[in-house]
């Protein structure tokens, strides 16, 4: 029997401030979180945090170097906090990662194995970063995969569409939040 977990990834204050397009993204994500909890599906928050002074950032890694230059993800900085509109509740886990994938530099794999979780439901910002990287690793680990297309967001809407309509459906199910909520049980209001 499949046991799923909802991963809520990189929904940190600074990231939301950059990417939120005013389309009701946080409301949709909140519905997915509430629906997961109502269905008994564990909610795991994944946040990126880099140590002050960036000792783990290589100049060869263009993506992470650009993130550091933008002032994002410094451990302890107010902008690295999970957005209060979707904040964890008691019983939710928070996993800290050091790169794009939820698996990179984190104990996520250990948490999943300890919980007998064999299927992931992905939500997060950005589709072209944490969602794509995590989906790729999940497929390599033979985990079931569902991507909530409207609970993912990217600063490049065209790239988001290409990923959610062309690539990610090759790896798993791609559903809107309401479709997923209908599939798992009663839709929370």
Image (cartoon, grey):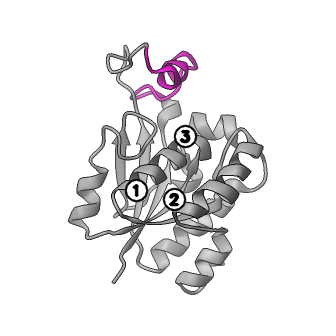
Mark seen at residue 117: none
* Secondary structure state at the residue bearing disc 3: helix
**N-term mark: 1 or 2:** 2
Does residue 126 appear left or right of residue 60 in this picture?
right
Mark seen at residue 138: 1
Indicate yes or no whether the magenta region holds residue 57. Answer: no
The residue carrying mark 3 is 129
Q: Which residues are magenta?
A: 60-77
Q: Mark 1 vs mark 2: give the one in front.
A: 1
Residue 4 visible, this orientation: yes
- Quarter of the rendering occupied by the N terminus: bottom left
CA gap, disc 3 to disc 2? 12 Å
Compared to 79, does 158 lie above or below? below
Q: Position of residue 66 (x, y in %)?
A: 55, 20
Q: Position of residue 65 (x, y in %)?
A: 49, 18
Q: Determine whether label 3 and label 2 are within 8 Å by CB.
A: no
What residue do we see at 41% from left, 34% from top? 99
CA gap, disc 3 to disc 1? 14 Å
Residue 187 visible, this orientation: no
Compared to 106, does 23 lie above or below? below
**N-term mark: 3 or 1:** 3
What residue do we see at 55% from left, 55% from top? 86
**In which quadrant of the rendered view does residue 53 lie?**
top left
């Amino acid at each position: 029997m499949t046991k799923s977990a909802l991963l809520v990834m990189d929904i940190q204050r600074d990231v939301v401030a950059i990417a939120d397009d005013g389309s009701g993204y946080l409301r949709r994500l909140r519905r997915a979180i509430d629906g997961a909890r109502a269905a008994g599906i564990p909610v795991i928050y994944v946040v990126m945090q880099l140590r002050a002074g960036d000792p783990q950032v290589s100049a060869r890694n263009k993506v992470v170097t650009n993130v550091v230059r933008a002032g994002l993800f410094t451990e302890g900085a107010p902008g690295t906090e999970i957005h209060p509109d979707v904040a964890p509740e008691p019983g939710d886990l928070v996993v800290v990662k050091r790169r794009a994938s939820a698996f990179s530099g984190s104990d996520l794999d250990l948490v999943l194995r300890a919980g007998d979780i064999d299927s992931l439901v992905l939500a997060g910002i950005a589709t072209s970063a944490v969602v794509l990287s995590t989906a790729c690793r999940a497929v390599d680990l033979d985990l079931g995969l569902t991507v909530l297309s409207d609970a993912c967001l990217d600063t490049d809407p065209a790239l988001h569409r290409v990923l959610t309509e062309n690539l990610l459906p090759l790896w798993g199910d791609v559903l809107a939040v309401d479709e997923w909520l209908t599939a798992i049980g009663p839709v929370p209001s």
